[in-house]
Image (spheres, grey):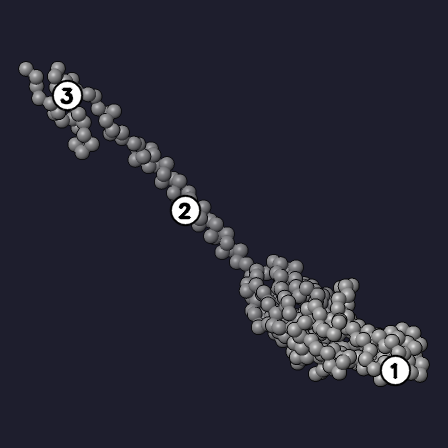
Amino acid sequence: MVTGAGAGPRAGRVRGERARGPSAAFDMALRRRPSLVLLLLVVRGVELSCIITDSQTNDPRIEWKKIQDEQTTYVFFDNKIQGDLTDRAELLGKTSLKIWNVTRTDSALYRCEVVARNDRKEIDEIVIELTVQVKPVAPVCRVPRAVPVGKAATLSCQEGEGFPRPHYSWYRNDVPLPTDSRANPRFRNSSFVLNPETGTLVFSAVHKEDSGQYYCIASNDAGSARCEEQDMEVYDLNIGGIIGGVLVVLTVLALITGGICCAYRRGYFISHNRNGESYKNPGKPDGVNYIRTDEEGDFRHKSSFVI
């Protein structure tokens, strides 16, 4: 007979499949225990047991396989560790599998196959489901600092390390918020919806009562973590001030426009063209050449008279 189990720090529930074929005296068989649930933060290594308790074969052949995402790969084959566990696994007691530095990617079905040629039941197997749970880390929370009354607002909470995927809950001033404000009379003056799967808290129209300190908690079976509190202020719009500001701007624009028009009428913006084309060229006697220089702004004598 062969037994199977999982062991390790803080090991959880264990269950297994039935062996294929009937068991009888002197037949090889496996002891069944179902699945193994581990907390990653406290587990450095886990042992998946595959123990032969009754067999007439002195040296049975052992194989371990990993079944993940509908794909089967070898873990132990031809008397050596294979695949992605080459540097992190070893065989214990000729049959059991020890995995070191467990990560959540190790969550899978592990199948131990035993071949005993001298037994009436030559082949037997057990399947152990390994689930590695990871406690969430502090989520990233985004809370708007100030929102005017009557406007929409969205608060977000995200965490990417926990496994299984965490659920989210929001708190205001240390009071847990329901998934729908309409379902709780305590929040009848609010209008928000909380999605615990995505971590978003959406206000369709904020009220003064929605002001306060907000924080989010991400939690799964392995534990929970929260973000720091953040303030959200809901303020009233100063309609009178806005109208007054608009009037001031319009008045300033009117004064500027009037000043420009007045200046045009008085000729302040008329351009006096004083380039060389505005002057008439004086007559010049024969034999005398004049040139105009940029420095002098006028003509100067270039050559002497020719007598």
Which of the image's four quarters has the N terminus?
A: bottom right
Q: Which residue is mark 1?
A: 56
Q: Quadrant of residue 237?
A: bottom right
Nearest to the observer: residue 250 or residue 85:
85
Q: Position of residue 184 (x, y in %)?
A: 72, 69
Q: Residues within 10 Å of mark 3 (few under 14, many from 20)?
A: some
Nearest to the observer: residue 6 or residue 201:
6
Nearest to the observer: residue 301 or residue 2:
2
Question: Residue drawn 88% across and 78% down?
Answer: 118
Q: Residues within 10 Å of mark 2 (few under 14, many from 20)?
A: few
Nearest to the observer: residue 26 or residue 233:
26
Return the mark for residue 252. Answer: 2
Q: Amino acid at mark 1?
A: Gln
Question: Residue drawn 55% across and 64% down?
Answer: 145
Q: Amino acid at mark 3?
A: Asn
Q: Amino acid at mark 2?
A: Val
Residue 221 makes an appearance in the image: yes
Looking at the image, is mark 1 or mark 2 earlier in the sequence? 1
What SS does tag 3 mark? loop
Callout 3–callout 2 Cβ contact below 8 Å: no
Looking at the image, is mark 3 or mark 1 earlier in the sequence? 1
**How far apart in space, not on screen, are marks 3 and 1 (Cα)?**
131 Å
Q: Position of residue 142 (x, y in %)?
A: 58, 65
Q: Which residue is mark 3?
A: 289
**How far apart in space, not on screen, are marks 3 and 2 (Cα)?**
58 Å
Q: Position of residue 177 (x, y in %)?
A: 68, 70
**Label 1 vs label 2, nearer the camera:** 1
What SS does tag 2 mark? helix
In the figure, 231 relative to 264: above or below? below
Q: Position of residue 170 (x, y in %)?
A: 65, 70
**Label 3 vs label 2, nearer the camera:** 3
